[in-house]
């Protein structure tokens, strides 16, 4: 077996010295404060059982998609899911991708064209950055959740380059940011984009299934669905399944089918994956209220407890299921995470360079099935260890 080239080996050595070397591990048996399974749907036995029943009802006995969606992989459950997504999320159309990463890379790699300009929040997800990087459009980042900085960057870019009627400006943000758990002022942002003819794209990955009536997301909670050019919803977090979808117009869907390389050149999702997403959405719509209410209660309890323990200044302000405690230094934050694991709690350390140096953190992901006792104890231990 050939060995790794020396320059790549040196990169691993550097990561190790910086205490930022990643490893694949298992945390089975620990109390979950780490996964994105906010509503417990990934382990829901009713969803599991109804998924199997759906496959039987549809007479589908097939393990894989057999090809890309443009060849042989576009089995009939895709139509069912995309119709349900469009209705549930009040969109004209929905197009399912294999993952949120694939959806973002496919969208941003094909939609913005040469001569267009993309402005994105500095904390935007890596998949969006990747997609933007493959497009021919110019791109600029603006300070996190700062509308005034976005306006200033747009003004500067307009002065630096000639624009024509053919120039499209795309503004990109998330409704809930994955590392901070905070949200931008989407109403103000949507109004700004609408007033200026800019196209707004919102990644709803961490809001899907969690925020809004019946878990429809923050965009619908605020009534902004008609003011957004495109939304991304994912199934691998609150929905507890696998895959993602871009919501938008029928024309956008047709364009992505023709030009989004991550859709065109990927084998489709298996019928079982699509059936799980269908079943999970049905469960969310009809029986998800209890889990949603429990999650909201746990978020409120967590925030009250960090106030009681005097930890407020350590935490980024967030009203979502993501609560991040800043503990600067890769070694220190890893040490605290390890101590919590030894006490039975799975709380992941987020290291630089994933987050900026000095902003390393413990990322608490709250769930509907976390008990009050678990929340209280993990925070009491945290206060002790830091």
Image (tube, helix red, strand yellow):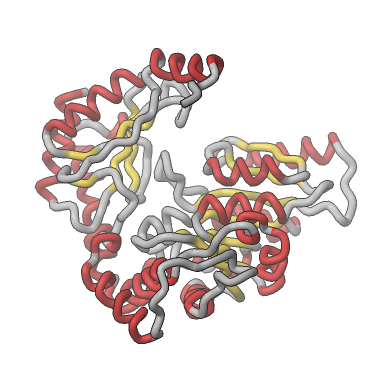
Viewer-nearest residue: 338 or 386: 338
Residue at left 46%, top 59%?
Answer: 234
Q: Reply above or below: 10 against 268.
A: above
Q: Is residue 137 above or below residue 60?
A: above
| Residue 173 image point, x, y percent | 57, 49
Q: Residue at x 55, y 61 (%)?
A: 267
Residue 127 visible from this viewpoint: yes
Furthest-front residue in this view: 1
The answer to which quarter of the image holds residue 137 is top right
Locate the C terminus by quadrant: top left
Residue 224 in view: no
Place residue 308 in its image quadrant.
top left
Instruction: List x then y, in percent, for residue 252.
Output: 69, 67
Q: Relative to residue 309, is residue 265 drawn left or right?
A: right
- Decide if residue 232 is on the left or right side of residue 330: right
Q: Is residue 99 left or right of residue 116?
A: left
Give percent across and percent down for residue 184. 51, 48
Q: Residue at x 21, y 28 (%)?
A: 338
Image coordinates of residue 382 in percent, x first then y, are 19, 31
């Amino acid at each position: 077996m050939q060995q790794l080239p020396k320059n790549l080996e040196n990169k691993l050595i550097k990561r190790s010295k910086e205490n930022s070397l990643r490893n694949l591990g298992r945390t089975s048996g620990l109390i979950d404060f780490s996964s994105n399974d906010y509503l417990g749907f990934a382990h829901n036995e009713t969803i599991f059982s109804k998924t199997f029943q759906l496959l039987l009802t549809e007479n589908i006995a097939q393990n894989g998609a057999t090809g890309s969606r443009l060849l042989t992989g576009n089995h009939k459950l895709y139509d069912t899911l995309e119709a349900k997504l469009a209705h549930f999320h009040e969109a004209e159309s929905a197009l399912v991708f294999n993952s949120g990463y694939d959806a973002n890379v496919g969208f941003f790699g094909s939609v913005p064209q040469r001569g267009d300009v993309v402005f994105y929040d500095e904390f935007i997800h890596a998949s969006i950055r990747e997609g933007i990087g493959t497009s021919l459009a110019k791109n600029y980042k603006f300070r996190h959740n700062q509308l005034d900085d976005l306006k200033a960057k747009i003004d500067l870019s307009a002065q630096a380059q000639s624009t024509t009627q053919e120039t499209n400006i795309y503004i990109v943000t998330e409704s809930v940011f994955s590392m901070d758990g905070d949200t931008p002022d989407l109403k103000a942002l949507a109004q700004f984009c609408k007033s200026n003819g800019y196209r707004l794209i919102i990644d709803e990955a961490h809001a899907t299934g969690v925020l809004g009536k019946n878990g429809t997301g923050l965009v619908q909670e605020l009534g902004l669905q008609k003011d957004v050019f495109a939304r991304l919803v994912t199934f691998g977090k609150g929905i507890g399944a696998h895959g993602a979808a871009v919501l938008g117009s029928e024309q956008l869907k047709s364009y992505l089918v023709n030009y989004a390389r991550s859709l065109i050149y990927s084998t489709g999702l298996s019928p079982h994956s699509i059936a799980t997403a269908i079943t999970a959405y049905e469960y969310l719509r009809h029986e998800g209220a209890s889990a949603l209410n429990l999650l909201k209660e746990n978020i409120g309890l967590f925030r009250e407890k960090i106030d009681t323990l005097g930890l407020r200044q350590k935490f980024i302000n967030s009203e979502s299921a993501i609560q991040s405690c800043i503990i600067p230094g890769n070694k220190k934050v890893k040490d605290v995470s390890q101590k919590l694991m030894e006490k039975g709690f799975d709380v992941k350390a987020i290291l630089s360079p994933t987050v900026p140096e000095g902003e390393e953190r413990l990322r608490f992901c709250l769930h509907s099935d976390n008990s009050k006792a678990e929340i209280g104890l993990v925070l009491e231990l945290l206060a002790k260890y830091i």
